Image (tube, rainbow, N blue to C red):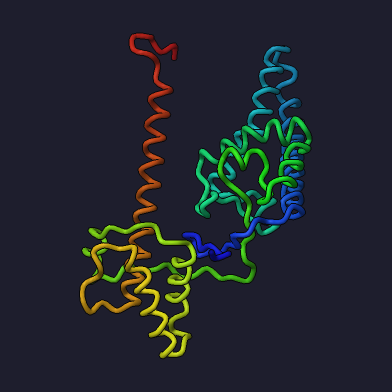
């Protein structure tokens, strides 16, 4: 199995878990940033609202602030950054799914909710013990969410996106494509990214070998006479497009479900 994963942004990840020390430093940076921002926000809020609110309102405001700091902010940051908080970005790591795919809102929410107990309530003690005991350095939130931290390879430049060969558009749209193994997908992507720098003989040989391996996961095969590199580009581009379309569908379904949940029951007047 390959120790590398190429994600959709053209960034190369090391599939091996990030070290315990790296994760601790990342969490420390995040805690300092969140703590500083919280103190500043609380100081500002007290200065503005203290003279005008009663004790009950103040308690409600404190609870809302704690929920925002410990759950809402970490969830949103990890969702929109695709698994990278400020601390993780500085330390060069990213949270990914167990299969190497990008995390979603669900994964971030589970990690944040679990973090209330294992990070904040116990000052990180539970997370430290769990990370030291787990072979992939997972904390409890990672175990529940099905995620773990990996290191981003340094010195790697993002590759240009793969373009769909125009003559294979119709074939690719109707082809049945199974999930390629991460190592095979990475090899095909790397070949396309550096084909113009390879020796012609090596380029032809690698292209034919990879095309033969990838063709096992595609039905029907490409039209007769298709160039191996054009075939690989079509497969990678179509898989990317399908994954993107699926992600959009999931987001739309989640938004629709959220709207239904927030609607008042039938016949109950809206107080607003």
- Locate the C terminus by quadrant: top left
Q: Residue at x 74, y 17 (%)?
A: 51
Please determine whether, in this image, residue 185 is positioned above or below residue 73: below
Q: Residue at x 38, y 85 (%)?
A: 204
Q: In which quarter of the view is residue 167 placed? A: bottom left
Q: In which quarter of the view is residue 223 placed? A: bottom left
Image-based side of 230 in relation to 195, left or right: left
Q: Where does residue 222 sit, x and y in percent of width and height?
A: 25, 70
Q: Residue at x 25, y 60 (%)?
A: 175
Please determine whether, in this image, residue 19 is positioned above or below residue 184: above
User: Residue 123 versus residue 140: which sits nearer the camera?
Assistant: 140
User: Residue 184 versus residue 268: which sits nearer the camera?
Assistant: 184
Image-based side of 135 in relation to 128, left or right: left
Please determine whether, in this image, residue 260 is positioned above or below residue 98: above
Q: Where does residue 70 sit, x and y in percent of width and height?
A: 67, 33
Q: Where does residue 169 sit, x and y in percent of width and height?
A: 25, 65
Image-based side of 76 in relation to 249, left or right: right
Q: Residue at x 42, y 81 (%)?
A: 206
Q: Where does residue 117 sit, x and y in percent of width and height?
A: 70, 30
Please determine whether, in this image, residue 265 is positioned above or below residue 249: above
């Amino acid at each position: 199995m390959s120790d590398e994963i190429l994600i959709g942004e053209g960034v190369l990840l090391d599939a091996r878990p990030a070290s315990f020390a790296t994760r601790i430093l990342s969490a420390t940076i995040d805690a300092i940033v969140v703590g500083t921002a919280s103190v500043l926000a609380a100081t500002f809020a007290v200065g503005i609202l203290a003279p005008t609110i009663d004790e009950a309102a103040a308690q409600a405001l404190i609870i809302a602030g704690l929920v925002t700091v410990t759950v809402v902010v970490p969830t949103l940051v990890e969702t929109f950054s695709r698994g990278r908080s400020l601390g993780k970005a500085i330390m060069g790591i990213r949270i990914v799914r167990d299969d190497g795919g990008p995390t979603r809102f669900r994964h971030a929410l589970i990690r944040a909710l679990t973090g209330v107990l294992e990070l904040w309530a116990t000052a990180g003690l539970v997370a430290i013990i769990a990370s030291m005991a787990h072979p992939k350095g997972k904390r409890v939130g990672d175990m529940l969410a099905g995620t773990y931290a990996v290191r981003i390879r340094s010195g790697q430049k993002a590759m240009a996106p793969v373009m769909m060969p125009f003559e294979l558009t119709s074939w690719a749209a109707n082809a049945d494509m199974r999930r390629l193994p991460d190592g095979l997908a990475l090899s095909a992507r790397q070949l396309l990214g550096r084909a113009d720098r390879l020796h012609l003989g090596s380029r032809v040989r690698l292209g034919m070998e990879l095309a033969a391996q990838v063709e096992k996961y595609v039905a029907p095969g490409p039209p007769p006479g298709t160039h191996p590199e054009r075939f690989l580009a079509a497969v990678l581009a179509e898989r990317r497009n399908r994954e993107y379309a699926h992600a959009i569908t999931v987001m739309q379904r989640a938004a629709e479900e959220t709207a239904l949940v927030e609607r008042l029951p039938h016949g109950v007047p809206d107080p607003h």
